């Protein structure tokens, strides 16, 4: 996740204006290591998500770890109100996953599957239970999960206690306004404690990695 100095997780509805070249390099590296990229449907819609690419620099490492050429993207959605004609669904290197609830609209499930996506039920009713999503992905052999947000999805992963690590870029910008923070939704009863594992700096950007204690 990337945040400005005053805690904004987006500007003009996107994260790109508050990111930078090195942040994007770290973003790509984290993808290069992951089995699956878990992302909320609103981020997919607003950021125009495309399938993850296979990258030469990670090819040997991924093969040795028994991973596919690129991480699968797992979109979390209750409505399944997504454009299934996009390359994310029709032409990924590895099939895109859709995490949804058991009561998801059957016609939207059919449309997703017809486009080539794999629908994974991870909750009762319409919504996905984060702990069940983690278990369902593990059941498919995916244990290195990279959650790319957005804030509404990340907040639920935090509240459910399934976030082990946070890679946070702090960009040297102030935006004011009413942008979301990196994690939203209801607050947790007791704040979760994380420890700093690494901290890098470049051109005023701080690149941190925290691990749950
Ligand atoms: N700073 C950063 O690092 C960063 C990272 C990512 C995104 N962003 C920014 O964050 C904004 C979007 O984030 P957001 O928080 O509004 O949305 P989001 O978390 O990306 O997506 C929210 C949507 O995800 C689905 N969803 C979330 N929790 C669910 C659950 N438990 N069960 C089923 N579906 C669930 C729902 O989709 P349906 O509506 O389809 O049901 C919901 O509307 C954009 O502006 C983006 O640029 C910033």
Image (spheres, rainbow, N blue to C red):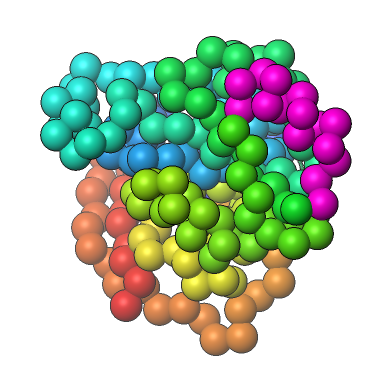
Give the camera-side residue of 165 and 54: 54
The quadrant where ligand 1 appears is top right
Magenta segment main secondary structure:
helix
Residue 169 point in image, percent of width and height: 40, 47
Instruction: Answer yes or no: is residue 185 visible.
Output: yes
Residue stretch in magenta: 103-117
Residue 136 x %, y %: 51, 54
**Foreground residue among 189 and 69:** 69
Residue appearing at x 54%, y 29% in the figure: 96
Depth check: 67 or 170 in front?
67
Residue 89 appears at what percent x and percent y? 61, 21
* The image quarter in which residue 86 lies: top right
| Residue at (83, 37) in percent of width and height | 106
Up/down of 170 relative to 67, above or below: below
Q: Residue at x 58, y 71 (%)?
A: 159
Left or right? Give the position of 88 relative to 22: right
Q: Is residue 109 magenta?
A: yes
Q: Is residue 140 left or right of residue 131?
A: left
**How far from the left and from the top, in percent, is residue 205?**
35, 43
Instruction: Quadrant for residue 197, please give it.
Output: bottom left
Question: In this view, which residue lies farthest toward the bottom?
Answer: 190
Viewer-nearest residue: 140 or 9:
140
């Amino acid at each position: 996740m990337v945040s400005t100095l005053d805690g904004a997780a987006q500007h003009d509805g996107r994260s790109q204006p508050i990111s930078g070249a090195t942040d994007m390099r770290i973003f790509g590296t984290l993808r290069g290591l992951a089995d699956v990229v878990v992302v909320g449907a609103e981020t997919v819609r607003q950021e125009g998500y495309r399938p993850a690419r296979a990258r030469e620099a990670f090819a040997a490492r991924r093969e040795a770890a028994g991973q596919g050429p690129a991480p699968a993207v797992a979109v979390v959605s209750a409505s399944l109100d997504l454009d299934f004609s996009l390359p994310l669904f029709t032409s990924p290197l590895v099939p895109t996953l859709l995490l949804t609830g058991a009561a998801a609209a059957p016609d939207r499930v059919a449309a997703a599957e017809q486009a080539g996506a794999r629908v994974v039920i991870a909750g009762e009713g319409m919504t996905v239970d984060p702990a069940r999503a983690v278990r369902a992905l593990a059941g498919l052999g995916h244990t290195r999960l990279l959650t790319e947000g957005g804030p509404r999805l990340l907040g639920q992963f935090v509240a459910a206690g399934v976030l082990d690590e946070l890679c946070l870029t702090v960009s040297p910008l102030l935006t004011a306004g009413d942008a979301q923070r990196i994690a939203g939704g209801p607050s947790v009863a007791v704040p979760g404690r994380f420890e700093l594992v690494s901290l890098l700096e470049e051109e005023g950007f701080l690149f941190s990695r925290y691990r749950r204690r």
